Every structure is written in structure tokens, then in C-alpha cells.
Image (cartoon, rainbow, N blue to C red):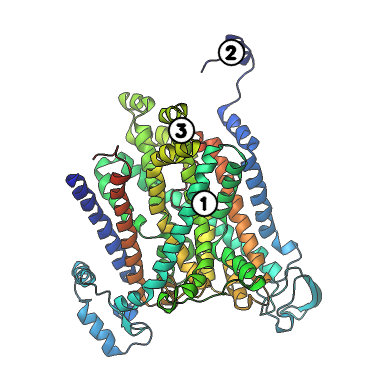
Amino acid sequence: MDTPLAEVATEAAVPAPAPRAAAWRRLLRNWSVRIGGALLLLLTLLSVLAPWLGTVDPTLIDPVNRDLLPGSRAAVVTLTGESFEHRFWMGSDSYGRDIYSRVLYGGRVSLVVGIAVALLSLFFGLIVGLTAGFLRRLDAVVMRVMDGLMAIPGILLAIALVALWRPSLPTVILAITVPEIPRVVRLTRALVLSIREEPYVEAAVSVGTSTFRLLYRHVLPNTVAPLIVQGTYICAFAILVEAILSFLGVGLSTDVPTWGNIMAEGRLQFTQYPHNVLFAGVFLALTVLAVNILGDGLRDTLDPRFSRESSNYGRGDRP
Amino acid sequence: MIRFLLQRLLATIPVLLVVAVVVFLLLRLTPGDPAAVIAGDIATTEQIEHIRESLGLNRPLVVQFGIWFGNVLQGDLGESFFFRKSVSELIAQRLEPTVALALCTIVLAVAVAVPLGVLAAWRHGGWLDRALMGFSTLGFSIPVFVLAYLLIWLVSLELGWLPVQGYQRLEEGFGPFIRHLILPSITLSVVYIALIARVTRAAVSEALTEDFVRTARAKGLPERRVLIRHALANAAVPIVTVIGIGLALLIGGVVVTESVYAIPGLGRLTVDAVLARDFPTIQGVILLFSVAYVLINLAIDLAYLALDPRIRY
């Protein structure tokens, strides 16, 4: 770095901020992180705080109130017999359920699935990837298996696994995780192989550091940034796949409010009441968009090596 | 050259083998008696017994795999008891709509994405570039079925330009055939366009920084020729690669698109099979899609030889 001497002098006078604080500041200055993060926070709050946002029981069936147009007011009778006036902001479906309530509660499923799949696939992918990158004898075998798994289109594998295990929240999460693991393994292994060549690793090896300590103290910290970026893309993709599974009728049971289920229910009368499909669709698209924008921002700030030129880095065949 | 071809072909074998093992294990991982699972919910005891006998289900797992794999190699993917047909026959019937949809989508996506990507790279940081990057993030985020319903609502219901749903076989005339494919192809191509355009932009902007581009400009070649003959031609390898890798995305999208537009193809068949828990059919379709994916990507690898004379293995 060619810094004029004068600047070096002034910089030295002010104590440099700790690297971690500097990274945080860089993150929060990035507009993609700000916009994506704010949108995601808003959507998360909407689904977490759903009970206090004027919703009713999202599974409450009421034939009298079916197929209401958005904005209509009607009396709602709860299971305990209470009756009160309720405004159906997004209308109701053909069972008389309030779509506004279903859409807000549906966000919970999407967020849980997205975050769980991201964490689980990073966890398993990291373990296998570190193993393959370090134990060279296993490498060839492990990577051939991963290549084979990656040759099966992810959504198809997820659909087949859900069909196998019968849908429930854990099985849906696992079924979406399995096709993601090889992609994390491949990334981790590539990172490990390049980090292994770094002088500081060589130095650590030459002073007799144990393999475990080497992995834990020197290699692992350097895989964190790319893996976080990868994790956000996995989260976005998992939210999409969960919605696809529900929409096709192979995901969570149809009485659970998920965005895919709401749309699957609404598609039957799409020509008369397009709002049934569109509200859930807009929320789904916005959530995935927010996570993707956040991912792009994280990539640009945390992992700047690849950000500018190869703008598809980190996505692979994942949208 | 011959050696490279052989090496590449040999490297494909373990991948295909892993695919076969995974697809085979899909059925064995199901809780319960595999024979009963294969037979589905409506089979008789004799049918189940017959399946157990013919697949050797009383013998070790390795032998079972051998029997199954031998059958697959002979084109026998088993029997769908739900559809009362052999799986190969079922697939053959449903192949045309899916291939037609996939081809239309690829042609459309490449025709739109590559020029857009080149222009964005040419005016790096300009309004088209930024618009394209924004569009592609949006394209990655909008679910296929949301887009499908938006298009149906706008084009078919409001404007009445195209049929809402359905499929016409090619033999019934090219006009209706293509009219039924326009909306599904547009729907399916958006993600694909987003992916290909991004990679084209990145690859072409890198090529544009090379010395040979400066030379080409310095000797006064028209910009169009510099972009196409010099920059794009040198960026071809990553672009073609992503077209191949993106097929996985396309296959996933086919399942959804065919369901929304009621196209009787392989994607629709997959969903029907899953809903009916018809495992032989699920296995057959997944095997077919995966093998097609591997072989197409193999063909693309080999096409590098033609595209890029610098690559000499």
C-alpha cells in the first residue's frame, strides 16, 4: 500500500479501531446490507409480533365469511363463541379464513425453515468440507460422492425426500438441507485448500501445532466470512423451496399457514379472486429479495475478493 | 485429445454410479416393506409377493442393487402400479412437452441474457448495467409460481392474448403448440436469464480489460466487432458453463411451471407420482433428469474444445 508518509503519521496518532469494530462499521455503511437488513427485520417483526397486529386465529374456518374481498368488514365468531367485528385487510379464502392473519403467521414457517436449513447445511458441510480438505486420503471419495449428489437437481431431491419421510417441519427442513450440503462442502474444501498454502499455516505447522488446533485456530476463522455469505443465499433458496413444496401440495399439511399453502389454496379460484395468491406471493418474493440483497451486501463487505467482477460468485447454481 | 475424451468419460462413471446408488437408496430408506411401498396402496398380496421375488428383496442389499441396476441398464425402470404402466413407457409419453418447454426456455434465455450481459459489461456501471443487476436480484427472488400467476393474470385474463393453461402437441400444428408454450417459457426463463446475464456481464467485463481488446480498438475495429469477436468470444467458456449448470435450476422450475400451466410433462408426472406415493415413477424421473444433467454437462465440457482453441488437454 502506497500511503504518503504524512498520512501514516496522522494515522498512527489516532489508535486504529479494532478489526472487528471496523468490519461492523463497514457492514453498516453498505446500502445493500442496510436495505436488505431493514426489510428482513420488518418482515421478521411482522411474523413474530403477528398475535398483536390485529390478527385472528389463522386456522379459524368460518363458512359465512368465505371469499371476502380485501378490506371488507365482517363478524368473526371464535371457537369459544366470542363474536367481534374484524376487518379482512387481505380478504378471506374459500374456507373463510383471514388471509392477512395467515400471511403474517405464514412468515414464521418460512423464516424458521430458511434459518434452520442455512445453519444445518453450513454445519454439516463445514465438517465434511474440513475433513475432505485436510485428510487428503478421503478427499477423492468424498468429493465423488458430493459430485454425484450435486448431479441430482436439488428441488427434485427435496421433493423425493419429503415424499419418503412424510411431511412435517423437521422433515421438510432436512429434505431441503440434504441437497445443499454438497455445495457447502465444495466451497469449504476449496477454501481449506487455498488457506493451507498460506504462510501462516506453514509457520504454524513448522512449530508443531496439532492438526485440531490448526483447524480450529487458523483455518476455521478464515472460512467464516465466505460461509456466512453462502449461508444467506442458502436461506433465500430454502425459503423458496419450502414455498414450492407447500404449493405443490407435497410440503407441510394444508392447514398449517405457509405462504405456499395459502397460494395453493388460492390458485383454485385464481380467476375470480386473484388476491388470494398475490398477497402471499408478494410477501414471499419480498422476503427472498430481502435475504438476497443482504447476501449481496455481506459478500461485498465481508468477502471483497470476488465481489466486484464476478458478481455471481457464491451463488453457484443457486438463484 | 483422445486421452482427454476418455478421461472425461471415465470421470463421469463414478458420478453416475453415486446418482444410481442414491436413487436406489431412496426406496430402501422408506420405513416399511419396500415391496409394499413399490406396489403402492392398491396392490394385492400376490402382487407384493411377485415384486419381492423379482427384485430379490429377501437377498442382501448389494444383490438387490445389482438386480435393480441391471434392470435400469436394460431400460427397465420398474412398474408403476398407480398408473398401471411401466415407468419407461410413462416417461416416454411425457417427454415431449418437457423437452419442448426446456428448449424454448433455453433459446429464449440465451437470446435475451447474452446481449443484455454484453451491453451491461460494455457500459460498466451505467444505467443498463445497474438495471440489469437489479433485475437479476429480483429474478433470483421471485418464485416461479408467483411469476406464473402474475403473467397469467396480466396476459391471459386481462389482455386475453394467450391461452391460460394447457398444452398442444406439435403434431396438432405449430401455431397452437407455440402459443401454449410462450407464457410457460417466459416464466421459466426469468431465473435463467438472471443467472446467464450476470455471468455474461462478469466474463465480458473481464475480457474487455485484456490487452487484445485494446489492440483491437487501437487498430480501429468497429466497437460491435470488438465486443462480439474479441470480448464475447473470449468469454464464451464461463457463459456456456453456466448454461449447463443452470439446467439444474431449470429442471426444478419445470416441475413448478408444468403444474401451474397444466402441461402434461415429466414435471407434472413427478408431482403426481409424489402425491400418489408412486416410488418407482419418482425414482425413474429423478434418475432420468440427473443422468440428462450429467451428460449435457459432459457434452458442454467437450464443447470447450471447439469453443476455445487455447484449451488443449
Per the image, label 3 sits on a secondary structure element best described as: loop
Q: Position of residue A66 (x, y in %)?
A: 71, 80
Residue B221 circle label: 3
Q: Position of residue B225 (x, y in %)?
A: 45, 38
Report whether mark 2 lies on the same chain as mark 1: no
Q: Is residue A72 left or right of residue A38?
A: right
Amino acid type at mark 1: Ala
* Residue nearest the observer in this picture, B128 or A150: B128
Image height of B18 relative to A94, above or below: above
Q: Is residue A221 visible?
A: no
* Residue nearest the observer in this picture, A240 or A79: A240
Residue at (28%, 45%) from the top-left corner? B305
* Residue nearest the observer in this picture, A28 or A81: A28
Q: How many marks?
A: 3
Residue at (28%, 85%) from the top-left corner? B48
Image height of A317 relative to A223, above or below: below
Q: Position of residue B257 (x, y in %)?
A: 50, 68
Q: Which residue is mark 2?
A: A8
Kindly check if marks 3 and 2 are in contact, taking CB atoms under 8 A apart as contact.
no
Crowd class of label 2 (few under 14; some 14 to 19; many from 20; radius 10 Å) = few
Q: Is residue B188 left or right of residue A197?
A: right
Kindly report the distance in space between the C-alpha atoms of the residues bearing marks 3 and 2. 46 Å
Q: Which residue is mark 1?
A: B194
